[in-house]
Image (cartoon, coloured by chain):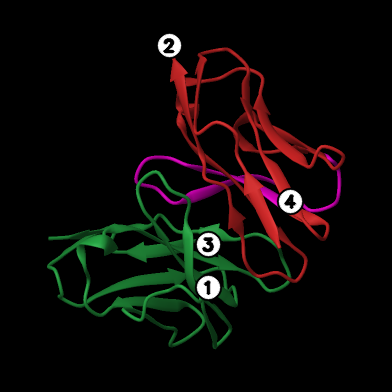
Chain colours: A red, B green
């Protein structure tokens, strides 16, 4: 069984400030972890993924995430928020041989001008 | 560009009137998924195809059906839409040898 917990359904940061979106996972086998972003009335776009290679993963739009096995975490960060980062962010988990993704409940990121 | 395409982007139907949503892909991926996403919620998997093999989620209502006539196309049929079926419907694809699902832009369904 696998699950994802995203702490904070809403996060607000000032433009130019650090973005930190939290994701903790539970998986009985080595996980694959993903961050997706969703803009209003759009589908999900892959930001980045971890699949057992480097623990620090760099994605699109300046985002990165670090896999920490000891903390069962995969938090998403960006050093400097931009207005265009305002969106819904979903963390998701799967594993080798599993065709399904298990999503977290999402975090809505608001950027304050 | 290779991509996942969903048509229409917005669909309005009447209560009880059957509706079909379409998904096509140019990625030649063998796995295709349909998700339902209600406002401010995570996507919920309805079913998926692994090649021609259909896999229904246990809690997907019988009102929802799917067809995959070939590798490129997959359809979601809602036989008798209710007000509770108003949602964004997302199609996604994945190649069997990879771990990543690629999503289409979604179809927003309104039921009047």
| Location of residue B31 (image quadrant) | bottom right
Location of mark 1 (residue): B32
Alpha carbon of mark 1 to alpha carbon of mark 4: how far?
A: 25 Å
**Foreground disc of the pair 1, 4:** 4
Q: Kindly state the secondary structure of the residue where label 4 is placed.
A: strand
Same chain under badges 4 and 3? The reply is: no
Identify the chain of the residue marked 1, using the numbered disc in the image: B
Q: CA distance from mark 4 to mark 2?
A: 36 Å
Nearer the observer, disc 4 or disc 3? 4
Mark earlier in primary sequence (3, 1): 3
Q: Which residue is mark 2?
A: A113
Q: Which residue has dot 3 on it?
A: B2
Query: Splitting the image into 4 quarters, where does residue A73 fall?
Result: top right
Q: Position of residue A86 (x, y in %)?
A: 45, 28
Helix, strand or loop at mark 3: loop
Measure the alpha-carbon separation of dots 3 and 2. Answer: 36 Å
Q: Are marks 2 and 1 on the same chain?
A: no
What residue would you read off at disc 4?
A26
Mark 3–mark 1 distance (CA, rounded to whole Å)? 15 Å
Instruction: Give the mark, 4 or 2, whose residue is nearer the N terminus.
Output: 4
Residue segment shown in magenta: A33-56
């Amino acid at each position: 069984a696998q699950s994802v917990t995203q702490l904070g359904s809403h996060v607000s940061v000032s433009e130019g400030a650090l973005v930190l979106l939290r994701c903790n996972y539970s998986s009985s086998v080595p996980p694959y972890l993903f961050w997706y972003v969703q803009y209003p009335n759009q589908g999900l776009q892959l930001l980045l993924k971890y699949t057992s290679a480097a623990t620090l993963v760099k994605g699109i739009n300046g985002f990165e995430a670090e896999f920490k096995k000891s903390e069962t975490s995969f938090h998403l960060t960006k050093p400097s928020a931009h207005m265009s980062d305002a969106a819904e962010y979903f963390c998701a988990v799967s594993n080798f041989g599993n065709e399904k993704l298990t999503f977290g409940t999402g975090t809505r990121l608001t950027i304050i001008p | 560009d290779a991509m996942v395409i969903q048509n229409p982007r917005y669909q309005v139907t009447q209560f009880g009137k059957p509706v079909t949503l379409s998904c096509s892909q140019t990625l030649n991926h063998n796995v295709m998924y349909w998700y339902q996403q209600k406002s401010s919620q995570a996507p919920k998997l309805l079913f998926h195809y692994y090649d021609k093999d259909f896999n229904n989620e246990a809690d997907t209502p019988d009102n929802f059906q799917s067809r995959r006539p070939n590798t490129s196309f997959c359809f979601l049929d809602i036989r008798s839409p209710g007000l509770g079926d108003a949602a964004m419907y997302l199609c996604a694809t994945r190649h069997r040898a990879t771990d990543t699902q690629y999503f289409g832009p979604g179809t927003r369904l309104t039921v009047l």
